[in-house]
Image (spheres, grey):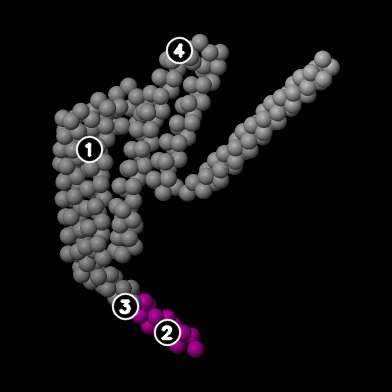
Amino acid sequence: MLSSVAFESIETVPLFVDRFVASWESAINALIAELPGIVGAVIILAVGVFLGGVLGSVAEKLGRQVGLADVFVDSPIESFLGEDGSLASALGVVVKYYVVVFAAFIAVRYVGFAILEEWLRALIEYLPRALAGLGVILVGIVVAEYAADQTAASEAVQTSDYGAWVTAGVRAILYFFVAVIGLDMLGINLEIVYLIVDGVTSAVGLGITAAIALAVGVAVGYAAKEYAEDGRATAEE
């Protein structure tokens, strides 16, 4: 009995080793079979990184030549536009990494990694929309600050006791509209914001309607009172 158990355990060891070796051999064979595709993908990605750097530098130089470097100088968003705070450098960075992402998409497609290919495809399709939304937000911030500065510099606001509140209100309203438009272009769901705005608008509309109705009612009441008093005075005469 013991000898048969020992014999079976001795027989199991070579079987396990054989399976282990076979699995390693299959893995190595699969790697060798995929090696040309992997090498090709690495080459495509390397070329994409190189082209991204070149095209990014070209885009930055062109941006400086057409004056984009001074567009947002001394603006609230200057610190968000790269190391030197210029739109030209930000344009170069965007072009560079867009080319790199596109090269990564081609490399993944060449290898045949379907899931990652779909992710990169979605990213490539989303990037232009995201950049447009960010552009709207950045330009809107500059416009809002300019409008707020002009409002604060106006004579009516400077002579008013509520000038600071008026300036803050103008800035807040413009920031709100800029944020809503930009975030909507970014694809962010703003349904709750629309509901809040609709509720506030409805409340303001009801308040204005009630105020108008009250004013009309008071005016009509005073007019009727004056008419009655005039009629009474005429009758007494």
User: Mark 2, mark 3: which one is toward the viewer?
Assistant: 3
How many angstroms separate mark 1 from mark 3 (CA)? 56 Å
Q: Which amino acid type is shown beneath numbered disc 3?
A: Asp
Q: Amino acid at mark 2?
A: Glu
231 or 190, which lies in front? 231
Which residue position holds label 1? 92
| Side of 52 where 230 appears, left or right | right
Which element is circle 2 on? helix
Point out residue 172 in the picture as x, y percentages from the top left corner. 49, 29
Q: Position of residue 54 (x, y in %)?
A: 15, 41
Q: How far apart are the two marked residues, 4 and 3, measured between alpha carbons?
A: 92 Å
Secondary structure under badge 3? helix
For marks 1 and 4, the one nearer the N-term is 1
The residue sitting at 23% across, 32% down in the picture is: 88
Query: Cα distance, mark 1 to mark 2?
Result: 69 Å
Q: Earlier in the sequence, mark 4 or mark 3?
A: 3
The circle drawn on residue 155 is 4
Mark 1 or mark 2, earlier in chain: 2
Closer to the camera, 187 or 225? 225
**Magenta run includes residue 110:** no
Q: Which numbered marker is on residue 8?
A: 2
